[in-house]
């Protein structure tokens, strides 16, 4: 069983590598520079896919946490925990990429506008989640506390998304995730191709990492069971 | 027991959401507009402020040896003159959005310590035959006059 999973994971890893390389090529070479931001705009090809992947990751935390509270299936909790860890990674990366983009365009690495502040809060909530999980030794209690925090933490994402509409911010409104305009009305098709390839690459990378991390979680569980009951 | 827990949780959640939403709506005024600044002019003196709006076309005067910039920021109704010494970001330009941080001086001029440029959520390649905007990024081809 695991052998088959291991093999499909290797294939997923290979696909990830190919698509990341393709994304880099398209983003750095094929796509034109922006009329207004020049070469700097290429950071978008990382920035948007990274944050969308982080959103997806915390959405998985949200769903799996709800499922765990309802059905108390250990596997749901392992998946929630795994997604939270990778979500923290991608949120951290988003903030770093945003800073690098912000300094030359906005003029500052960081500013306390609503969107940036709420994104920092999202990062801190889920860093808190990871600390909480590692501090509580009782597995079931840890899982329940984690699930509750994971559900509450996810609710920050709609706030982040709406922040640029509700408050005055330095950050611009969304280019892609919006109901009133189609993506190619904001992003020129030649750039949208690069963005899509990179988004696909990030999704593949995400599910590759998630399946690896989930596998680690399952093995950890197995080791614990062996220690408790002995035997293979 | 479970149901009580659920109802309690929902109430806490609703209260939290209300507090965050309501509280932030008022507290998180990231920048004031020139009109708002003119209204509360007296109380705004000597207080750290952020002001945002559009850089008025034709108002920008640079002194590149002293590194000083004078320009006006407008929200379409009121206009506030700004003085800045330093290096503004590459995207800072007339007719574009900007946010400045600093204080209002006695003469009503906004003394900015930081100038930030806003940009739109739209991206497209430059038109045929024109260089992409921040020309200073092409080594040796810095914008003439800068």
Image: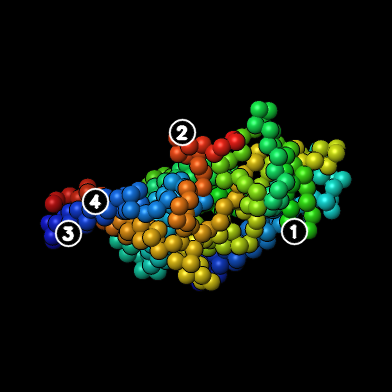
Q: CA distance from mark 1 to mark 3?
A: 59 Å
Q: In 3D space, how far apart are the residues under numbered discs 3 and 4 (Cα atoms)?
A: 14 Å
SS at circle 2: loop
Describe the element under mark 4 as helix, strand or loop: helix
Does the CB distance between marks 2 and 3 fall below 8 Å? no
Front one among B106 and A118 = B106
Q: Nearer the viewer, mark 3 or mark 4?
A: 4
Could you tell me which chain the residue with mark 3 belongs to? A
User: Which residue, given by chain and number where applicable, does mark 4 sit on?
Assistant: A17
Asked whether the residues under marks 1 and 3 belong to the same chain, the reply is no
Say if B65 sits above or below A144 in the image. above
Give x and y (percent) for residue B113: 69, 36
The lab-note entry on whether marks 2 and 4 share a chain reads no
Mark 3, secondary structure of its residue: helix
Q: Which mark is residue B140?
A: 2
Q: Position of residue A25 (x, y in %)?
A: 30, 50
Q: How many marks?
A: 4
Q: Left or right? Give the position of A60 relative to A108.
A: left
Circle 2 residues within 10 Å: few <14, some 14–19, many ≥20: few
In the image, A225 versus A118, the foreground residue is: A118
Comparing marks 1 and 3, which lies closer to the viewer?
Answer: 1
Mark sitting on residue B76: 1
Mark closer to the chain start, 2 or 1: 1
Task: Check contact, mark 2 vs mark 4: CB within 8 A.
Answer: no
Number of other residues with Cα within 10 Å of mark 4, as a class: few under 14, some 14 to 19, many 20 or more: some
Q: Chain of mark 4?
A: A
Quickly name the residue at label 3. Answer: A8
């Amino acid at each position: 069983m695991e052998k088959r999973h291991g093999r499909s994971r290797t294939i997923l890893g290979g696909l990830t590598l190919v698509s990341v390389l393709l994304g880099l090529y398209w983003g750095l070479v094929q796509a034109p520079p922006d009329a207004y931001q020049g070469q700097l705009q290429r950071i978008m090809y990382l920035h948007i896919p990274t944050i969308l992947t982080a959103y997806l990751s915390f959405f998985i935390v949200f769903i799996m946490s709800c499922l765990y509270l309802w059905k108390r299936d250990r596997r749901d909790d392992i998946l929630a925990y795994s997604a939270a860890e990778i979500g923290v990674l991608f949120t951290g990366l988003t903030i770093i990429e945003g800073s690098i983009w912000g300094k030359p365009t906005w003029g500052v690495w960081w500013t306390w506008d609503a969107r940036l502040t709420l994104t920092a809060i999202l990062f801190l909530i889920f860093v808190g989640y990871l600390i909480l999980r590692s501090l509580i030794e009782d597995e079931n209690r840890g899982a329940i506390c984690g699930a509750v925090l994971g559900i509450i933490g996810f609710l920050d994402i709609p706030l982040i998304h709406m922040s640029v509409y509700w408050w005055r911010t330095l950050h611009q409104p969304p280019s892609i995730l919006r109901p009133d305009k189609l993506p190619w009305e904001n992003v020129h098709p030649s750039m949208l191709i690069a963005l899509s390839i990179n988004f696909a690459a990030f999704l593949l990378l995400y599910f590759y990492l998630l399946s690896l991390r989930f596998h680690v979680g399952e093995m950890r569980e197995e080791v614990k069971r062996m220690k408790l009951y002995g035997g293979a | 027991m479970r149901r009580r827990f659920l109802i309690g949780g929902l109430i806490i959640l609703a209260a939290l959401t209300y507090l965050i939403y309501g509280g932030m709506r008022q507290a998180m005024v990231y920048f004031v507009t020139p009109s708002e600044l003119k209204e509360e002019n007296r109380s705004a003196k000597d207080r750290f402020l952020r002001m945002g709006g559009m850089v008025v076309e034709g108002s920008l005067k640079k002194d590149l040896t002293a590194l000083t910039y004078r320009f006006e920021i407008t929200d379409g109704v009121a206009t506030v003159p700004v003085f800045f010494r330093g290096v503004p970001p590459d995207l800072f330009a007339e007719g574009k959005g900007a946010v400045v941080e600093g204080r209002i001086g006695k003469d009503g001029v906004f003394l900015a310590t930081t100038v930030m440029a806003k940009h739109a959520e739209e991206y497209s390649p430059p038109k045929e035959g024109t260089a992409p905007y921040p020309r200073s990024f092409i080594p040796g081809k810095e914008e003439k006059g800068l």
